[in-house]
Image: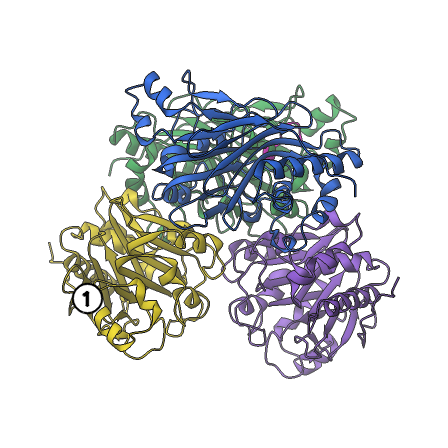
Chain colours: A purple, B blue, C yellow, D green
């Protein structure tokens, strides 16, 4: 399916996070260890916040591993909050409008996983998108429609609630069409101030998700590791799979959970899809 | 908006039609004389029938004028019926799934023009597509949705009727949304046996459309022109704008007309949109 | 590095060779079993002979596995002789002019492997190309320069001799620069009438190369296999690695060998680089 | 041929320079008024300096006018010194390695024009590049080889002298091959601290080049124009053709001149090619 990474913290040049580590995200585009398949070569994307309120986005249909523009751009932009995604399509075309992260005003969104039997449920799900948002859907992926469902269901006011309602709706419509496992995956979304991450699947066997250990703990563990120099107490990396094998650095997000990375204390909660109330 | 060409007749190597003439279609990608704008550099596509029943399609997001693959492919395939299209987007993304001709089973479809105020009417028009066809929509253009509307409304059985119903529907939905001129353009479609072409606009000032004079007449006019060697009595070229300035070669299709190129006598008829009957 | 396939024989629709088999070439673009690395996603190319004397070529920088144009084009062209190549770059840019097969007049050429320490020896090798051929070099790969060296050294008159001289020159220039193993790989080249394949490395541990068993033998082995229907006594497939695991189908080319597939009896010979004679 | 723009001055978001003006550089990619041809759609590139010493570069083979990544990237990066180039190829392939600006360590280089009869003189010019620099040539354009000739002839120490020597060499080698007009064009190059621009042609009818009037003068002329808000006394824009028609803003660089934009007083001098001394 895909692999992704989200960074929150002290402003850092993006390439220092994207290309570093024994198993960096860019390496994972060529050979991931924990993905549904090893190769994630069907395009990529990055989205970052700089001083502007709205994020910048760079999408490409090329594999990330040899992309020179990605290396240049990530090597010349510092950001305190950015998302990166390498894609393995589950059937929809390889095109920039199908590359994550998707954006809407100050929001970014990316997903690893699948809406089960997408072409069967697509029409019903698209119809559930707010008609004023509908024209903004630019690609043809399940992931982007999920984003617009979450926006329809209140993402801007209550991100965890909106995602739980969106996936509740996906499950209800999937069930109605006889789809065995309507949703699978992990999601990251951000408004530029906080970063939410989700791990859930109808099957109860969700794609992996990890978050990095707090900086102070890492610094105590590895006082001399120069890679920690760019980080601080607010720094957190959330990833589909660990960027390295060092003990104590990567912590699995529990099955059916969501978390938020934010100024001060980060949080982790149980994720429960919320089915729509019958009209 | 765009420029297109359709060829029907004696099998011929495609490049001999695409690249020939003082103002060939490929030249028109760089500088058309009669288009809404001179440059049609937002991708291109060709669709052709060979011995297989289903057509082959080649799409690219690059401008046609310098595309080496187009020159190679068109220079090595003979076809008795093919469509070619150079695109100037009216706003939708430059991506292969937005390149014409679109295909569905043995059918091809291409369009020059616009559904007025597309993002306003898009949702209603997409909803009118047969739900079993809906999942096959791959891009985000007005032109492709129009194709699926025509398929929904009987293209396979009665092409002129289906297109008149589809555009009647576009006009009704456009009117409902206060769109002044809901449809503009020319269309070519084929099932591999006959070729239909349409010229119509709600405004009554449609994009230009031309068809080539019958071979026997051309041969009488220009008995020594070697370019006629590849053609025969069944050969006909339909184009957005003439490929050259020679007298007697290119004939304008009248405003609000449709024609069919077929074995034996070709035909031309009046085009009248058919509004849907209120349920 | 790369994977490739060459077909010679009864005209066949190209996709029937490219996409068939448990481990088809297109599958090998995503996960090869015997390549220097599993993924060959840095572009691809096909070259084919039709009724024209000169071959057609289609190159793309996208991975082959999801490329729609490749499926369409190979699915609509029959050919009696074609080459296909999926690329894993050893450092040179991912661009169409670096995609194999390379072509010059009626000749095609493709290579899996590497000229050792390419950037060190490149200038000397490029200088050895005939100055009248030099301007025709369009990309920046070792493989293309090797093609132009072979052309310089007589490919059109004596293909095996020219390739042995070209690699002899590569070895001499490599040795002069202290390159331990100046050449590694397999090569296919054709003039549209015969197909030559080469396997050699300075190290004596060359990339794998296989050829298919004669049709009559295969037919005796697998009388009911429908995949044999498209072939005849002249049919031969040469590949970097087998397309399947069936016993008796794929035969390794011995280390340091070259073979020719041609009308009548095919041949296999020892490959011996020929060092240039000192002036 | 091409159109380009160079900005030097107060740090500014790049899109504010690239997309602004009645005839912005991005508009010029679709329809330039003073170019050798109106369309410059064969790829584009930008190069910028940020806090890092080395510049970032973004290249694309797509036309600039509809490129979303260009809009995003230029809309999220501030720079005090950047180059932008929209390409119309004079024959060499449309690929990222042929897109300007070219870079080498802290240097950027771009060119509008042509080395006359490029394929005839290419080999001799490439041979004149320092063998240690030769492997760094990545594309196949005249413009990039000219950059490496200038580097070979001292660009890092004496930019105007090196460019005069490089073009002197181009003229001598061109003359030797009977090329009537060996060089034509304008060049911009920078080390991140100063910006040099050149206008020259063997024919004496060089491509146009303009520089913007000093900020203080512009501010006096147009005290209320909000577009001036982003600039200061050090700001200078150098362009192939004016970005607008306002009086007093754009000043032509005289035929056969070079200038330097730098802290303090900018300068303009006569350009005289320096032929190589016979060995």
SS majority, magenta: loop
Q: Is residue B221 above or below residue C226?
A: above
Name the foreground residue: A152 vs A123.
Answer: A123
Say which residue appears at 47% left-offset and 36% top-offset: D111
Say which residue appears at 70% left-offset and 62% top-offset: A121
Q: Is residue D255 above or below residue C36?
A: above
Parent chain of label 1: C
Question: Residue C76 at what x, y percent from top left?
Answer: 40, 51
Q: Residues within 10 Å of mark 1 (few under 14, many from 20)?
A: many
In which image quadrant can residue C44 be found?
A: bottom left
Q: Is residue A146 found inside the magenta-colored segment of the image?
A: no
Q: Is residue A194 left or right of residue B115?
A: right
Name the foreground residue: A198 vs D271.
Answer: A198
Q: Is residue A62 left or right of residue D220?
A: left
Which residue is label 1 attached to? C258
Q: Is residue A11 above or below residue C31?
A: above
- Report the span colored magenta: D21-26
Say which residue appears at 18% left-offset and 60% top-offset: C262
Question: Residue B7 at what x, y percent from top left?
Answer: 43, 34
In which image quadrant can residue B132 be found?
A: bottom right
Q: Is label 1 in a helix, a strand or a loop?
A: strand
Name the foreground residue: C217 vs C106.
Answer: C217
Question: Residue A195 at what x, y percent from top left?
Answer: 76, 65
Say which residue appears at 48% left-offset and 21% top-offset: B251
């Amino acid at each position: 399916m895909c692999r992704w990474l989200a960074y929150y913290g002290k402003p850092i040049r993006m390439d220092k996070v994207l290309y570093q580590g024994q198993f960096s995200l860019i390496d994972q585009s060529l050979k991931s260890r924990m993905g549904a398949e090893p190769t994630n070569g069907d395009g990529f994307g990055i989205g970052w916040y700089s001083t502007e309120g709205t994020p910048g986005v760079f999408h490409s249909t090329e594999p990330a591993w040899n992309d020179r523009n990605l290396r240049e751009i990530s090597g010349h932009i510092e950001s305190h909050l950015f998302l990166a995604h390498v894609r393995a399509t589950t059937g929809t075309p390889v095109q920039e409008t199908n590359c994550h992260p998707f954006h809407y005003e100050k929001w970014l969104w990316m997903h690893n996983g699948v809406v089960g039997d997408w072409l069967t449920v697509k029409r019903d799900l698209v119809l559930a998108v707010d008609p004023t948002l509908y024209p903004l859907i630019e690609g043809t992926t399940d992931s982007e429609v999920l984003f617009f469902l979450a926006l329809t269901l209140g993402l801007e006011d209550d991100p965890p609630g909106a995602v739980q309602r969106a996936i509740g709706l996906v499950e209800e419509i999937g069930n109605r069409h006889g789809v065995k496992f309507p949703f699978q995956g992990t999601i990251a979304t951000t408004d530029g101030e906080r970063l939410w991450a989700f791990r859930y699947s109808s099957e109860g066997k969700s794609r992996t998700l990890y978050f990095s250990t707090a900086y102070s703990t890492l610094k105590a563990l590895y006082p001399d590791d120069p890679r920690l120099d760019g980080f601080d107490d607010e720094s957190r990396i959330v990833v589909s799979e660990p960027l390295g094998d060092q003990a104590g650095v990567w912590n699995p997000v529990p099955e059916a959970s969501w978390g938020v990375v934010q100024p001060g204390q980060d949080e982790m909660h149980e994720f429960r899809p919320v089915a729509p109330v019958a009209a």
